[in-house]
Image (cartoon, rainbow, N blue to C red):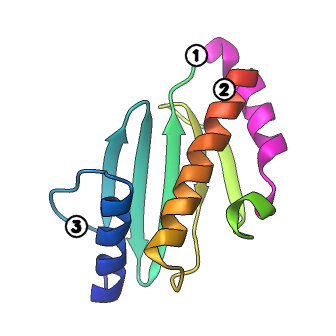
Amino acid sequence: MDLQTERRLEQFFYLARLPIIRMESRMEVVDPPFRLYVESQQDRVVFAVVLPIDKAQSFAALSALLERCIPERTQGIPMRCFLSQPGLTISCSPDPEFSPEAWFSLYSELKKMLSQAKGSA
């Protein structure tokens, strides 16, 4: 991970009030009830936000999430939604030039979308 990406991530974690002990190319952070996975690949950053969900609700929640996945909600960034072992997952890779504030706004929107999808399932 380059130094500029590392500094942006540090600022993002500060804005999100998330604890990070050490910056690594792959990180997992618990932000109850969410889990945030961050992966840095060269100058790109991939965010994956997971919300645990009951198996009985999973397909309805995924369908509700897919209805909400319009790029206008995430500053034009395409998203991927899927069910994973931990739960309902949404991931995206924002432009590396985005500010930490934009990353934080994106993260907040992803959590909101997951919560709404789970609530409507």
- Residue 108 is situated, as x and y percent measured from the top left of the image, at 55, 51
Q: Earlier in the sequence, mark 1 or mark 2?
A: 1
- The residue positioned 57% from the left and 68% from the top of the image is 93
Q: Please state the extent of the stretch shown in magenta in the rendering.
A: 54-71
Q: Locate the N terminus by quadrant.
A: bottom left
Helix, strand or loop status at disc 1: loop
- Which quarter of the figure has residue 79? bottom right
Dominant secondary structure (helix, strand or loop) of the stretch shown in magenta: helix
Q: Is residue 21 magenta?
A: no
Q: CA distance from mark 1 to mark 3?
A: 32 Å
- Asked if residue 120 is positioned above or below residue 5 in the image, the reply reads above
Q: Amino acid at mark 1?
A: Asp
Residues packed near mark 2 inside 10 Å, few (<14), some (14 to 19) or many (20 plus): many
Is residue 59 shown in magenta?
yes
Say whether residue 114 is left or right of residue 35: right
Between discs 2 and 3, the one toward the N terminus: 3
Q: Nearer the viewer, mark 1 or mark 2?
A: 2
Residue under pointer 1: 54
**Above or below, comparing residue 45 to residue 3 in the picture:** above
- Label located before the other in sequence (1 or 3): 3
Q: Residue at x 74, y 38 (%)?
A: 65
Q: Position of residue 28 (x, y in %)?
A: 33, 49
Residue 40 at x, y percent in the picture: 39, 71
User: Does dot 2 land on a helix, a strand or a loop?
Assistant: helix
Assess disc 1: are there few (<14), some (14-19) or many (≥20) residues with their C-alpha within 10 Å of its C-alpha: few
* Residue picked out by circle 2: 118
Vertical placement of 73 versus 84: above or below?
below
For badge 3, the amino acid type reads Met
